[in-house]
Amino acid sequence: MRLFLAFPELTDRVEAFIYSELGLKEFKGVPVLDPAEAEWAAVADSELYYITGSRTPQSSRDVEEKLRAFGQPKERLHPAAQLLYEYLSLWEPVAYRPRSVRVEASTLCQLNCAGCYMRLDHSGTTGRGNLSFAAFRKLLDENPGIRAVELSNSGEVFLNPQLHEILQLAYERGIMITLINGVNFNDVPDRVLEDLVRCRVETVWVSIDGATQKTYGEYRRNGSLEKVLNNIRKLNVLKERYHTDRPELVWKYVIMQHNQDEVGQAAEMAEALGMKRSYTLDWRGGVTAKDPETLYRITGLQCFNVDEYLAEEQHRFNSDFYCGQMIIDPQINWDGRLLGCCTVYRSDWKTNVFETPLEEIYNNSHYRAAVLALLSGEDRYSFEGPCGTCEVYRANVRQLHYRLQL
């Protein structure tokens, strides 16, 4: 439902929601019908728009098959992105109230990871700096609809000297904080470790690409595996003291050529520490699986090389996740510049969220044109912005891939 929360006027175009996961009876005054119990005759003359989203395991194909099982013809089924496209293509001012945003807490980092685009390209144009407490407070003040903030991205969030104040303000205002893009967790002040628990941070994904210092340090150069593990242990003690299961801890493991042999050992260590696991691919490519069956059994991944993934799936790994951010939860640089998505670091949208409300920015013709091209698969929209030179974005426009994932 995040789409209808971000664009509240979309609800005016809906007769009823057919949705079974949240157990809702209504949403913004519109009835919510369970597909197993819905009186389909009541919407017999209506078009059906479905949402899959990046946070559900269902694909658009799965959703369509389920709806067709209830006797709904394929020609009536459309992705919700089409509804959003029809709304935005009117080129009238729209109400935009994003429930979540992504804000870079710090572009600084004490490590020198072998494949880090920020270190390889001298931080691009994002610059080196930290999100200030004053700027964070202003962002929340001027965009009161925000209820969730992702704070990690291209740097190490725990190097922000005002993180204590930022987490405290988020807690006081009931803002959910996540650190999903990843943290290296090498250097975390004790006060901030306690803040993670006391301020009810939702989840922390820790980047640990090995089970031994030798393997871990080959990619996470200047990093200490023992320091990371000690911080995790201290955090677990604090969670016990506060009688809470938050933050949820996730061991984030990038599958690379040199660390495949330690995937199993790392999985056992994660379980012992009470951590969930997440696996991703090395964006640099060049990975050949030594034992594909074992890797699949442990990671659940069916492909271990980004180039092979592209050839098999016809879209880049995680490409739907990246492009969707500019619609649902836009990425903001530490100094307020709007980036759009978390992969942008060499340019921006030439506007500052700390100076201009997000709703006003979304009504900017260039930004909206980029969204319309993404939703429609039509390359006829002209705009100036980071998406214009992005291979992932262009591929999604050409292949209509993202349109089926919103």
Image (cartoon, rainbow, N blue to C red):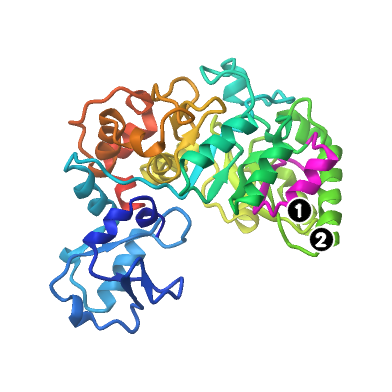
Counting from the top left corner in percent of width and height, residue 343 is at 49, 31
Give left or right: position of 362 versus 337: left
Counting from the top left corner in percent of width and height, residue 203 is at 65, 52
> Circle 2 sits in a helix, a strand or a loop, which is it?
loop
**Residue 265 in the image: above or below residue 153:** below
Range of residues picked out in magenta? 186-210
Type of residue at label 2?
Answer: Tyr
> Circle 1 sits in a helix, a strand or a loop, which is it?
helix
**Residue 207 in the image: above or below residue 267:** above
Whether residue 376 appears in magenta in the rendering, the answer is no
Q: Which mark is residue 108?
A: none
Closer to us: 48 or 131:
131
* Crowding near the residue tagged with mark 1, few <14, some 14–19, many ≥20 C-alpha atoms within 10 Å: some
Give the quarter of the image for residue 72.
bottom left
Q: Which residue is mark 1?
A: 198
Give left or right: position of 15 versus 229: left
